[in-house]
Image (tube, grey):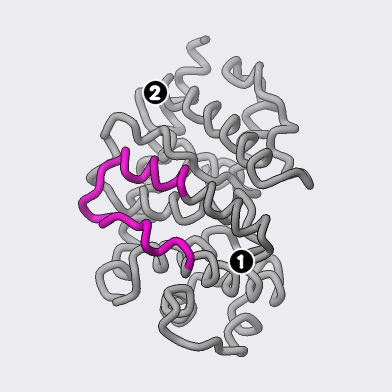
Amino acid sequence: MTKRDIEMAKYLSREGYLFSIELHDTNRNYFDTLTDSYFAIASAIALCWTGHAKYENDFIEYASSFIDGTIVKDITIAPNYCKRFGVDELDNALVNFRAYYRKVKHLMPVFTTCTVQHINRLQQNLLNQLNTLRNAGQVSGIGPWLFLGPFKIILGDQQRLWNIDGIDAIVLPTGMEVDRGINRLKNEGYTFMNDFDPHWLEETTGSLLDNYATCSMVHTHIIKIAELANSSALHINSSLYQYGRKDI
């Protein structure tokens, strides 16, 4: 790797760490105050992170309770709080996250005390569960991007795990902004992007497991950048979001 590569990796690490802190502080209040399950809260916030919904208190409070299964559907929520993908996509995501969580809630660890290894095993277990549910027609519309969203929020909230070995094994979502950030690095000619194939960023019509495998390849490349800066994929993922938006 060149000096330029290492300098960029360190820059992304610094900016990503600061953005991770900002996201942690912004989201922490919901975990402190809402009484819904931890995973339901993380899923609600993740729908804002993906751009499905506006990042507003009323939405996150409703979505957490709805996904947790403690309240009935409010048909005014999707029209009032949808963002990038429209009413139907937000409504579909909420309904299917509720159905999905109902089937897997018994698998959840205590996120405030569990280990990185617990979360890694949970991710693999939930992936298999979701694949079974999709194949049985019990859940639809949750692909790798939406599936991985809550894990970004969970790791961002659990600051105690940021420097723990093994955190990079937990696959994180990319999405439009992160994809743009990765393509920007590729176009700028950094050596660490030489073996990156932009086609990896395309979600195909293949199976959930096939698309997830591609997400894992992208995540592995993000780990490669993180290792140049002695950082973590969590922080590089955060900075690539900013880099894609040209905020940094």
Residue 158 sits inside the magenta stretch: no
Q: Residue at x 23, y 55 (%)?
A: 112
Mark in front: 1 vs 2: 1
Query: What span is colored magenta in the figure?
Result: 103-125
Give percent across and percent down for residue 183: 68, 34
Q: Is residue 74 above or below residue 61?
A: below
Name the residue tied to disc 1.
Answer: 52
Name the residue tied to disc 2.
Answer: 229
Mark 1 lies on a secondary structure that is loop
- Magenta segment, prevailing SS (helix, strand or loop): helix
Q: Is residue 63 above or below residue 4?
A: below
Rounded to the nearest whole Å, what is the CA distance between mark 1 and mark 2? 32 Å
96 sits left or right of 225 in the view? right
For badge 1, the amino acid type reads: His
Q: Residues within 10 Å of mark 2 (few under 14, many from 20)?
A: some
87 sits left or right of 156 in the view? right
Give percent across and percent down for residue 55: 49, 70
For badge 2, the amino acid type reads: Ala
105 sits left or right of 200 in the view? left
